Amino acid sequence: MKFKLIYPRWEKLDDQTIFNLPPHGPVVMAAEIPKDIEIDFTDENVETLIIDETPDLVGISMMLTTQVKRGWAIADMYRKMGKKVIFGGISTMLHAEETLLHADSIFLGEVEGRLEQVFADFRANNLKKVYNFLTTPPDMALVGSARRDILKKDLYYHKGYRMVDLFHASRGCRFDCYPCAVRYLGGRGFRPRPIDKVVEELSQMDNNRLFIVDNSLAMDNKWEKDLFRAMIPLKKKWVSHTIEDKDDVLDLAAQAGAWYVYQAIFDTSDYIRDRIKRYHDHGIGVEGTILLGMDNQTEDDIRRLIDFLLEIDLDLAEFTVLVPFPHTKAHSDLLKQNRIFDTNWDNYNAGKVVYQPKHMSPEKLTELYHYAWDTFYKDEPQTQKMFNLLDKVMQREVADGTFTPRRRELRRQSFGKKVE
């Protein structure tokens, strides 16, 4: 049996450097597919999708809202050919009712221990319309190593540099942030993987550079420190969302290979300034994530925030506008207030304004969004700041013997003339 698994393309933002990371959802799903099934995977962001009649079953994995319309279009083409199509992934869960209109089946929730039955149903010509496991997450001990062998790894380089592989050590989140749908997707609870399972998967990965995609590592102090201690011998270099900014945690994180962290910057307080400094004091870079358009922000607030970012020595900054994704409190509030004026899911990409801001026009917020990108990267472009971080991690890789000759050769070819 041949299973065609597809990760749809989406339009990238003009302001950002374009690069593609190997997707996480499809490789996690692939680990649960019965071994006798042939998997043919296409990431449409890095390769051309060929629509043909060879698959027995087609799967479409969607993470982003901006992927859904493309995913639906792909499904419609296959279904016209008489092929069965099943959808899964985060944005399938957020857009389930609409996706059902383009699907023979949708899978909602986490896959561990559940896909064998799905494929058995398909073989018996009894594929269910909906497999709903949203409220019953699996035992985290069942989460094994992802099937990264389905990826065409040579496609995930940027200017000669191998990009990070995505990895997760936990699921869920005990927080309930205004623009976030994690509570709906995985419940308001922290669910860590057993440390030995984490180490087992990390040991199998051939990429030294990782993005730990957990919602936050600052969920449980003991588990966080146990995780970092276990990672130290592996000599990985990793990016993550927030970690605790306590000295003992930061020291262990640095030893474990913390490369840089994503840190939400929501005000101009000394708390934020000091937090960035503590990361840097431990040799950990910081990419600030800055959300524009919240109801507590005026135009002057946003301009002051941008000025503040230039003072605190960020390594990178990523600016987004508030997006009212389905199943978030932001969506619920703005919908009740009749402030959402655009429901074209292609525009829900964090770079376009789809609602009426409280203190300014949509046009003004759009202007400030572009002003933020232009101002922060005026003196040093984003590509150069990215290279600065890459250069730092390569120095660390050289020091601990994990920097490969192939990377060195690619570096000379792609960046040498630009940065000398």
Image (cartoon, helix red, strand yellow):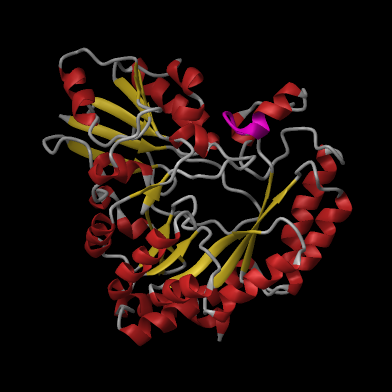
Q: What is the residue that sits farthest to the top in this orientation? A: 126
Locate residue 194, reporting x and y percent.
Answer: 28, 53
Q: Is residue 54 left or right of residue 179?
A: left
Please count the marks in the image: 0
| Placement of 418 over or under 128, stated as above or below | below
Task: Quarter of the image for the N terminus: give it.
Answer: top left
Instruction: Identify the residue at horizontal 39%, vertical 24% (top origin).
Output: 75
Q: What is the residue that sits farthest to the left in this orientation? A: 36
| Placement of 315 over or under 369, stated as above or below | below
Q: Is residue 23 visible?
A: no
Q: Is residue 126 magenta?
A: no
Instruction: Identify the residue at horizontal 35%, vertical 36% (top origin).
Output: 6
| Placement of 36 over or under 420, stated as above or below | above
Q: Nearer the viewer, residue 306 or 44?
A: 306
Q: Nearer the viewer, residue 382 or 45?
A: 382
The magenta stretch spans which residues?
325-331
Q: Is residue 330 magenta?
A: yes
Locate residue 269, reporting x and y percent.
Answer: 76, 64
Instruction: Identify the residue at horizontal 24%, vertical 30% (top origin).
Output: 115
Q: Is residue 333 left or right of residue 238?
A: right
Q: Quadrant of residue 336?
A: top right
Q: Is residue 25 left or right of residue 1?
A: right
Locate residue 369, reporting x and y percent.
Answer: 75, 51
Instruction: Identify the residue at horizontal 64%, vertical 40% (top origin).
Output: 178
| Placement of 363 over or under 372, stated as above or below | above
Locate residue 4, reporting x and y percent.
Answer: 27, 33
